[in-house]
Image (spheres, rainbow, N blue to C red):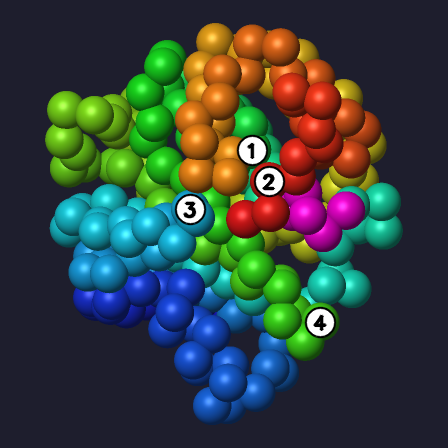
Amino acid sequence: MEIRYLKSVDSTHTYLKEYIKRNGFSNSLCFYTQEQTAGIGSRGNSWIGTKGNLFFSFVIKQDDLPNDLEIQSSSIYFSFVLKDILKQLGSEVWLKWPNDFYINNYKIGGTITSLSNGLVYCGIGLNLNNVNSEFLKLDIQINIKELFKLYFQNIEKKILWEDILKEYVVEFERSKNLHATINNEKIPLINAQLNSDGSININNKKVFSLR
């Protein structure tokens, strides 16, 4: 994984996609910054990133994902791999379905993914410093370069989805205390059931994260 730093950018996700459109794809690539001005959140929402937090986006070939991973659940996959590393470093972070990083019952970050021409784009934001009253920040100090090293090493291992799922099934129970936005409506997850492909059954419907 080639990693490049941007001093400030509107959105690492948008910047990366435009870069690949102009230059083509030759190798896995990541752009990161600690200040973005027009970030992309879930469901098309804007995500303004205050200076000092961490925002990064990377692109890999779909073929570099494990064979048993449904592409619709790649956000869960990418998020859980990062969450696991943060836990190993001493954080109490957990993953709310499908792609939000939480400390206790407060969001500290999130993930979005998209697929285009056989390439998977993933964008992740984490609050390290500056937050408002609705959010918390990561509960440990991290070395960003070391975090990237550990994270992308694990992505390159192509850890099987079934191994991720075995751990996430237990953690998913914490999501049942909260809500998820489905079709622009906040739905309580208390009765949600997690399926083996990362989707959930809720209100007699099967729902993938799709982001």
Q: What residue type is labelled 4?
A: Gly
* Mark 2 touches mark 4? (CB < 8 Å): no
Gap between marks 4 and 3, in whole Å?
A: 22 Å
Tag 1's secondary structure? Answer: loop
Q: Is residue 80 above or below residue 54?
A: above
Q: Which of marks 1 and 2 precedes in the sequence?
A: 1
Q: Is residue 127 left or right of residue 80?
A: left
Res 184 → quadrant: top left
Q: Which of marks 3 and 4 precedes in the sequence?
A: 3
Percent coordinates x, y for residue 19 in the rendering: 44, 81
* Mark 2 touches mark 1? (CB < 8 Å): yes
Q: Name the residue under label 4.
A: 118
Q: Name the residue under label 3.
A: 42
Range of the magenta residues? 70-74
Tag 4's secondary structure? Answer: loop
Q: Looking at the image, which residue is at 72% across and 32% down?
A: 206
Of residue 35 and residue 134, the one placed in the foreground of this image is 134
* Mark 3 touches mark 2? (CB < 8 Å): no
Q: Which quadrant is home to the N terminus?
A: bottom right
Q: Looking at the image, which residue is at 47% across and 74% down?
A: 17
Q: Mark 2 points at which residue?
A: 209
- Which numbered marker is on residue 98? 1
Q: How crowded is mark 3: few (under 14 residues within 10 Å), some or many (20 or more)?
A: some
Q: Is residue 9 above or below residue 171?
A: below
Q: Is residue 8 above or below residue 201?
A: below
Q: In this view, does 86 lie to the left or right of 135?
A: right
Percent coordinates x, y for residue 193 in the rendering: 70, 17
Q: What residue type is labelled 3?
A: Ser
